[in-house]
Amino acid sequence: MTRLFAMLIASLLLAVAAQAASFRTEAEQETTVRAIAAKLRCPVCQSENILDSQSGTAKEMMTILREQLAQGRSEAEIVEFFRSRYGDYVMLSPPASGYGGLVWAAPLLLLLAGGGAYLLLLRRSTRASGALDAAAPERSPLTEQHLKGLEL
Amino acid sequence: MTALAAKMRDTPRWKWLLGGAVVAIPLLLGIGLTKDPSFIPSMIVGHEIPAFELSKLSGEGQVASSVLVGKPFVVNFWASWCVSCREEHPILIALGEQAAHSGSFTMVGINYRDGRSAALSYLDRHGRFPYPSGVDGRGRTGIDFGVYGMPETYFVDAGGIVRARHVGPLTREAIVKNLALIGAQP
Amino acid sequence: MVDSLIKLGQLAVCLALVLSVYAVVQAVLSVTGHAPARLRAARNVLYANVALVSFGCATLIWSFATLDFSVAYVAANGSSQLPMIYRLTAMWGAHEGSLMLWLWYLTVLSAIAAWLHFRDHPLSMPWVIATLAAVQFGFLAFIVFLSNPFLTMTPPLTEGQDLNPLLQDPGLVFHPPVLYLGYVGFAIPFAFALASLIRTQAGTEWVKVVRGWTLFAWTMLTSGILMGGFWAYYELGWGGYWGWDPVENASLMPWLTGTALLHSMMAQDKRGLFRTWNVFLVVTTFLLTLIGTFLVRSGVLTSVHAFAVDPGRGAYMLGFLTMVMLVGYGLILLRSERLSADALVESAWSRESAILGNNVLLLVAAATVFVGTLYPLFVEAVSGERLSVGAPYFNKVVVPLMLAVVFLLGIGPSIPWRRMNPHRFKTGFRIPAAALVLALAVTLAFGVRDVLTIVAILAVSFAAAATLADVVTGIRARQRTTGEPLWRAAARSILIGRQRYGGLIVHLGIALIGAGIIASGLFQTAITVSLKPGDSFELAGNVVTLRGVEDADGPGYSGRAAILSISRDGVPLTEMRPQKRFYRVRSMATTEIAIRSSLAGDLYMVAGDETAQGGIVIRGYWNPLVNWIWAGWFVVAFGALLSLSSVRRKRAPRAVSAAGIEGVPAE
């Protein structure tokens, strides 16, 4: 009797757990679907991803994406599937190699150039002025400005 | 001369950059003006044709790539909702008759993302093709081909390798040029 | 009669075109000839052009109001089914008419600038007027020869093709006019920048004028961009407000450089720094507004917002753009030496240095957006390959840069000019530092583990706390010294220090917007479900039940509405009715989303395809804190207007001005 009862409870728990698990994987899969879809460009629209696009082709691409995820394919494989059909054009996030790699490097190069210019200017400038007034009186950061005319 | 060289040497780097931008940006935008921003190059030209097996739009049987390979053939994607398809319609019919006469190549249509009745009444209005069309209702075959603008026409050689793709309404010049590529007599 | 009215409108615009050439010639000649009469004549042209272009616009609007389909532009963008309000705003619904709006702004702002500054800047005025008239000529010629909205057709159509349904929305009434005002506003600083380059003088008087106009243009641009985002949010129905579309990027670039300009102008104002740099920023910002117009109207990039494409127009715009670039950057290359600063950045721990950092970050962000937007063009030009640079790229590279800007936004205003003792840093930032720790603890406690998310939350909390602390410290200090009650001390401080407090309030607004963007961008929940009547689903604690689907027809369209009832914890809250509409004239389908807003976030419902058995597909979103973005806009606008009210016209004493500028009477 107790054994039966225990089994009953166990199976009940299992069912609940399975339910929760299936719910979770469903929700998780939906998140994955959306994440991948947001990176794929609809080939028949004006710069829209297949998630937001209402075009038939985009909707069919969404279906393919869901099917392939359900078959256990990885994001890279799915992206490659579409890339082999539409080329790099279909990737809203450009590939990290070739010309795509260059555009990923651009912000970093720009930041280095900008940072370099900032440091250079600062060093040149502070050196030139440092000789002039090494003993300039320090101004209070906050209160003094707030009080006086507030001409900041 | 040396004065110029000295002047160039003394010019600060940012001036070269700014001057370069003045030249480069209009140049780039100008080149951009001559290009079509929605054009997508085909990924399958030079590769084997994606396999398809579609039921015929009218009549029994199937349109299958496996049957077509062995002889040069032309695949045309069309739909009743596609406005510029109407433009190439007479050319397609002529090309189909030409294929039947010469026997050096085959012609096949793929009805892309369309309703069967809409497609059939479209053919009734504009004239039937002298070759079969397969039904690609959900557009899977189209996606396999990388179709993005309708109509599109693919030229495949006897070995099943795609040799050319034409986007937009077919022209006689395009037909002559592309048939030569797949070893068919125009 | 009506036909001749629109022809009169065209005549007025053609006359304005001729007059703009006359104004350029007179203004330039007035410099060499010492001829005040010539300068006055040139100025009067700017006034006259307001009247002429206003009349042109009026005839166009009148044609829309009376549905005169003999006017080709009206026939293409109006219809008898269009409600009156959209008939009046349809003028800027397509390419030609929106250029007219642009031009009208340009004439009005030019005239205002001439009227405000004519006496105070007599030596700059010839060049300012010549530049503005030349820019007017550029747009007038474009309208008259390549984008003429006054063309008529015989025989007239009996029915028009209707306005694009997406534009039949209150958003269209406000978004383009405000955005364009922002774009055009930068033409005035540009004119003054050219004048200062030609005269090789960028003194303090220049600073005051440019600062005021930049602040005005920046406020409008910010408002226009946010309104556009709001419009996209409730009209396009994809649950977001910013998609990194090329045209959106085109509006963001001048915003970034304009923001940099606002800050570095302060350094020139207070310390005489960054003169050439400021001129460069002014020219660049104006150029970016033109590049934006080019990108939208030339068809060089695909975009959801693009106008009808015409290569001739693209070529013209490119020519115009290149001319402006050659003149602007060319003058900088030739004249920069003579604009050198008379001061130096003295210490890395100074406001100057912080502003420099702000400028570097904003410019890198602008350059990144520029590179990313035009990169597909570049790749195609060099290799013939096609690739896309889209939202995932920009989110990854621009967001970190902007977070750094937000951090700096908290620090900058409390650092004094010239230099500060680094030890002060510790005492000055006790409160923001505490906020930083608190925010970190809360974020971690809520289980957020993504580094970028954590950094984003920290940046916004820090900036908000630092800005608030700054405001409070100032008010307290006044209260201590004057002994006034708190509210009076607050009002007085803010009133007296409008420029500073206006800026701080703008910063607060930006922090609010930042919070909204982070929350709605990173914590959005979305769900797509197919419902039959009676079915329900849960979204962010709300239970959404489909009651049914019913007809919802309106002027010019037939619609279907899904009736959704919303309840929370068993308590019914409200009903939401997202619609799908079909506009008959253009045979175009649109979605009308339904939103239930609260401070915590928006419940956002989109109706999809109807299914068998009276069911429908519903896309639901929970967008947390998205309202903070729009609330932040009000704060930003308030702060900016407060700051703008502190810009006073510098009235030169009569005697001085008369002596300084012989020949120009002080009217």
Image (spheres, coloured by chain):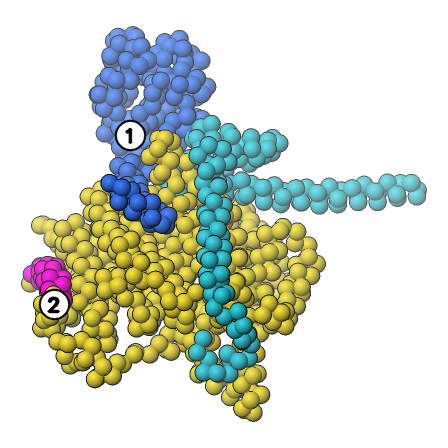
Chain colours: A cyan, B blue, C yellow
Q: Is residue B130 above or below residue C645?
A: above
Observer-nearest of A68 and C298:
C298
Q: Is residue A46 left or right of residue C147?
A: right
Q: Secondary structure at mark 2?
A: helix
Q: Quadrant of the N terminus of chain C?
A: bottom left
Q: Which residues are magenta?
A: C4-31
Query: What residue occupies the far bottom of the structure in this picture?
Result: C483
Which chain is home to disc 2?
A: C
The image shows residue C63 at horizontal and vertical percentages of 16, 61
Q: List the residue tagged with mark 1.
A: B168
- Residue drawn 25% across and 83% down? C653
Residue at screen point 36% across, 50% down: B12
Residue C30's disc number: 2
Residue C573 in which image quadrant: bottom right
Position of the C terminus of chain C, as image quadrant, is: bottom left
Q: Is residue C302 left or right of residue A118?
A: left
**Residue C19 falls inside the magenta stretch:** yes
